[in-house]
Amino acid sequence: MQTAIGELSTAGNSPVSPGNNHESLQRNDCDVRTRVLNMEMSTGFVRLLKATIGNDAFSNWFSNTEFSLPDDHTILIHVPSRFSADYIEANYSAAILNCCKKVGVRVLKSRYRVRKSAANNSNIKRLHSPGGRNHAGLDPRFSFERFVVGEANKAAHAAAMRICHLKRGQGGLLHLYGATGVGKTHLIMAAGQHLDTAWSDADIRFMTAELFTSEFVTSSRTRKLQEFRQRIRSLDVLLIDDIQFFAGKTKTTEELELTIDALTGFGKVIMMSCNKHIDEIESFGPRLRSRIQHGLVAKIGMPDTKLKRQILHAKLAELRKTSPHVRLADGVATFISDNIGGDIRHIEGAVGRLDAAASYLPLPITQHHAAHLLMDLLNIQHLRPRIVDIVEAVASYYGLKPTDLVSKNRSAAVARARQIGIFLASEMTPHSVSQIGKHFARDYTTVNYSINKIRGLCNSRQDVVNDIDAIRKGITLPQ
């Protein structure tokens, strides 16, 4: 896996194609030299992004991605295909910018470059190996046993189970739809693995819409379309994820129609996921809609509080098997599940942060710790302090005046207190590095240095950890 912020150097003078904010890049055809970040910052960014979006999402979308900094305001994301660029921009651009901010990298926007050579050489092994997927592209972690059933997803779960009870040769179609991060991929993979076990010697394959499109286009260009069709239509079970990305691709959509006809006509099974109901995708014609609606169609809704609580407890139980050091005080898990917003990936992100924070926070992790650690994931706006609140708490703890922290005083005691204030402002407020710098009357470089300095001390000195924990408790939050 080459996910890292670092130097990317190539040579040549190939033009870059326009379109949205995505650019096509062929590695040996464009001269790009980017600023190098130190390894500690690079590792911290990747770890934080993984904890924020969850291991599964990170494995799916960032295993073949590189990050670089072409200037002081932009993070450049090198992706294997335009499909990946569209998906990452739509779902994870805010998370990327937020993680940059938290590791002290000041960027205001993200741009994308597509490596043409990578897109032309897509293959199932390369795309799926980082997640530990098998020959069929199925991730063994996505099983029925690990799927938590609740009011929001019980109809979809029942539909997936019904597909699993089909006799071989009976044929069937399952279409699951719902918002990002509610478990659609998990369910169709679970059904695929169940059939892989139940049907001996079954030929099963999981594909993203990106991969299906890439293989179809490449086969068409190389005059191997019949080989592609034979390979796909000989499958016993085909699973396609995120078919909404076929919208607007006329030839690929027509191929999908033909594929559905061929598979169901020969008693095969096809399962698909989408982020919306098939009727809401206007560019899908009536023939494709009709074919899909003749199968099992089920929606997965956003998890309610009860389901979130069940999912969080299940994921914490799994975490304790590999990280027994993670301990939560009584009531903390309920506090998180009752207040966390968003989808299941928010829960996965929260669990990842708790795991990472257990290495430096006093144990067990209290509600106070969890509130500040997961502030951006919780629907409790008053938990977010202002910079002035942080300055007052730091000054009070060290017996200083708030004005000392924003003065030119460089004595050791004031400098350390100022660094801690800057660090807490970066952790606990939504302000950028430059905004924090203005409040403390310090430049961008000084603010970054302070953040990295205190972060390093938290990993090596318990007294600094204790001081920061005590200051957090003393911060007066806005009402």
Image: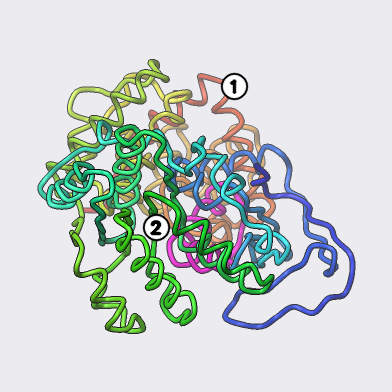
Specify which label sits upstream in the sequence, 1 or 2.
2
Label 2 is placed on what type of residue?
Asp
Label 1: how many Cα within 10 Å (few below 14, some 14–19, many 20+): few
Q: Residue at x 55, y 68 (%)?
A: 216
Q: What segment is highlighted magenta in the picture?
A: 83-110
Above or below: residue 239 compared with residue 360: below
Residue 332 lies left or right of residue 192; in this view the side is left
Q: Residue at x 50, y 66 (%)?
A: 89
Write down the quadrant of residue 458 in the picture. top right
Residue 191 lies left or right of residue 225; in this view the side is left
Q: Secondary structure at mark 1?
A: loop
Above or below: residue 321 compared with residue 109: above
**Residue 334: percent from left, percent from top:** 17, 34
Observer-nearest residue: 171 or 454? 171
**Residue 335: percent from left, percent from top:** 19, 37
Residue 355 lies left or right of residue 199; in this view the side is right
Q: Main secondary structure of the magenta part?
A: helix
Q: Report if residue 91 lies within the magenta region.
A: yes
Q: CA distance from mark 1 to mark 2?
A: 44 Å
Q: Report if residue 231 lies within the magenta region.
A: no
As drawn, the residue found furthest toward the top would be: 324
Observer-nearest residue: 395 or 359? 359
**Residue 304: percent from left, percent from top:** 14, 49
Label 1 is placed on what type of residue?
Ser
Write down the quadrant of residue 203 in the picture. top left
Above or below: residue 91 compared with residue 194: below
Q: Which mark is residue 460?
A: 1
Q: Residue at x 69, y 70 (%)?
A: 222
Observer-nearest residue: 280 or 164? 164
Residue 173 lies left or right of residue 350; in this view the side is left
Q: Which mark is residue 241?
A: 2
Q: Secondary structure at mark 2?
A: strand
